[in-house]
Every structure is written in structure tokens, then in C-alpha cells.
Image (cartoon, rainbow, N blue to C red):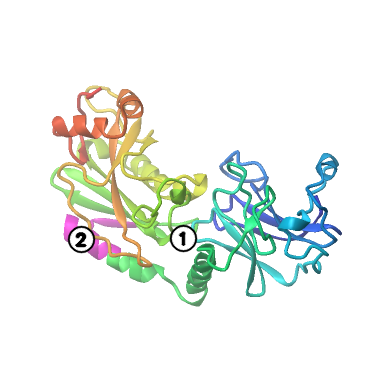
Amino acid sequence: MGAPLAGSVSPNGNLEAILEQDDRCAYLYLREPDDAPFPLGLGVRSCWVRNLAPAPPMIRISEMREGLAPMMPAPSCAHPEGAPPLSGGAVRFVWLEEGDAVALLEGDDLLAIMPCWSGREGFQGYARDCTEESPLASPLGADNVFRERVRAAEAYWRSWLEGDPWPPVREAGLKAIAVALGKPTHTYPLGGAWPPQALVRCARADAVVLVTCGVQLRPQPSVELHAEDPRPLRRIELALGIERPLFDLAPERIMAWVSTQARSPWQRLAWLGHRHTVACDAIPPGPSGRAFGAALLLRHAIGAPEVAFPPFRNDPVTLLWMVPITADERGLAERAGSEELPRRLARKGHGFVHRDRAPVA
């Protein structure tokens, strides 16, 4: 490996991009910082950026055995005689809005990008100076969709520097929640980590309903690994309905759990979607003593009102209801597929408000 030339930590704080260069070549690396709060186990991923010396006819295995980053072979290199070295003061990093991918630029010129799937199935990243597919990088063509995504990301980060997208999102969200659930009884700002978020509490008959506002400010990471069109899935808010006697047993713990889920996609680089399940240690047992140690996420839970959040940055915003379930019910969802558990819950009439109940598995 060469000498570090420049670096940047992701907005999530759990990835670090490093540009390294020696007298032969330059590479972009993506790794977890040593002090990452939630270890991801991603290892170190690398993408060739350019050769600085004449390119070899093929990858030199001997370089790799010596712990050196391999040079790009001449057939795949735009500058087979070598290009000028990069300057740390001339390059900059742009993180995509999800925080799971990074681009390297020299001025306004896009040199390389490492998407969220870099390091998978032999793909490392895209490089401008790569002319054909290689184990070290893939070509970054003029029609590559990431060029527009990088421009959009720059506009997004600039919107936070030049203004504050949060107030209009907050006001529109509070209005949508009030229309669907009635005027909120409490609104709790969730301090600490950026971006700003709020937890909204509403009263509905004998239940308490908690709804997040602000999760939508960032698209969820890694959605594009699972959906050809990530737009309908990547912006969410979360909600939990629970009968008041149960809520009153542990209000702080329940609200803290909901708040934690609102941050988890970016902390763990894993998205939340319809029929996903998540662990839950916050729901107190009712008279039966039964534990509900997980939650099922549903777009449409029985009896749940429609909270019509306006689109954000041209993406729809999906509200996911968190329905507490038992460990056996979670096991059913994993064994029988994502549709069976919601079907059984609906058959028994278990709706969006959690109550002490008999299991369906």
C-alpha cells in the first residue's frame, strides 16, 4: 500500500475513504474506522484510480505477494505510459446521500466511485482511467448513472450548508400526522446525531401512537442491492401503536427503542422495509407474561390510518408500522416466507395497536 494522500469519513461515521499513492499507482480504499460504533465486518475494499508509471502487460502477481497495490495492465489503462501523480490538495470526496458509497473527484472531474456493492463478486468500483473490465476496476463511462447521483449528492450536501431542509419537512410531517391521528400530545426532538429527527406522540382511543418525523431526510443504504428501482423503498418513517396500560409500564424504554430504529439503517448499513423483522427489547409483558421480542414492519397494518407524508426530493415516503411479535412468530416469518405471518395476524384480527395476545405461531 502507498502513502495516504487524502481521506474522508462518511456522514454515518462508520466508513472511511482513503486515497493512497506510491510512485507506481494510486488507489481509493473504503474501510471501517477503527473506532466505528457498530462493527460491520466489511473489511477493506479497494479501487484502482490511475497508474503513475508505465503499465505492465498484465497484473503482476509478484507485486501483490509483496503487499503492493497492483498496477493496471496496459490493455485496460487509459494512460499506458503513466499519468501525473495526484495532489492531496486537488482531490475531494463526495459521499452519496445514503453514506454507503463514495466518489473521488479532482476539481469537478469524477475520477472514481465505489458503490455500496464494491468488493462483491469481483467488482471493485468505477474508475475514469480504466478502459475495459479488470479485476482492479471497471470503466466509468460518460453514461454511467453515478455521474448524476454524484451531482445530486453534492446538491443535497450543499442544501444543508446553505440552508436547512429540516423545518419544512418537520412542518409537513407534523401536519400529515395530525390529519391522520389527531393533534399530537407531545413532540420530542431527537438530539445528538445528524440529521435532525422528532418522535411524535398521539393519543388514539385507549392507545398511544408514536410516529417518527425526519427519518425520510436521508435515503436508506443498500436498497439498490435488493430492488431494481430503489425509489419507492428508500425513504421511510416509522410508527408504533400500543395500548396505553402497556405503554405506561415503560414509556421511556419504548420511545428510546423507536428512536434507535430510526437511526439503525445508517448505523448498520441495512435497510428497513415491508415485512422485515427487527429485534425488540422494549415491549413490557402484559397479564399473560408473554414476551414480544421482535417487531414486524408493515406498510398496511389492520386499522392503521393512512399518514400521507409528502414526497421528499421526488421520492415517496413510506410509513412502516412496527407490530410487536413473539420469537416463535419471527421464526415463522423466517421459515415460511414474508407473507405468512402477516396473513395469520390479519386472520386473527390483530391490528396496528399492540395488545397482550395469544401467539399465532
Residue that numbered label 2 is attached to: 178
Q: Is residue 220 above or below residue 280?
A: below
In percent of width and height, residue 200 lies at 29, 55
Q: Nearer the viewer, residue 109 or 19?
A: 109
Q: Which residues are magenta?
A: 173-189
Specify the amino acid type for callout 1. Answer: Pro
As helix, strand or loop, the secondary structure at mark 2 comes to helix
Q: Is residue 221 above or below residue 40?
A: below
Q: Residue at x 49, y 61 (%)?
A: 97
For label 2, the crowd category at 10 Å Cα-Cα, with few meaning under 14, some 14 to 19 and many 20 or more, is: some
The answer to whether residue 309 is left or right of residue 348 is right
As helix, strand or loop, the secondary structure at mark 1 comes to loop
Judge whether residue 89 is colored magenta: no
Q: Residue at x 28, y 67 (%)?
A: 172
Q: Is residue 351 above or below residue 319?
A: above
Specify the amino acid type for callout 2. Answer: Ala
Residue that numbered label 1 is attached to: 195
Name the N-terminal-most of marks 1 and 2: 2
Residue 217 sits in which quadrant?
Answer: bottom left
In percent of width and height, residue 204 lies at 16, 49
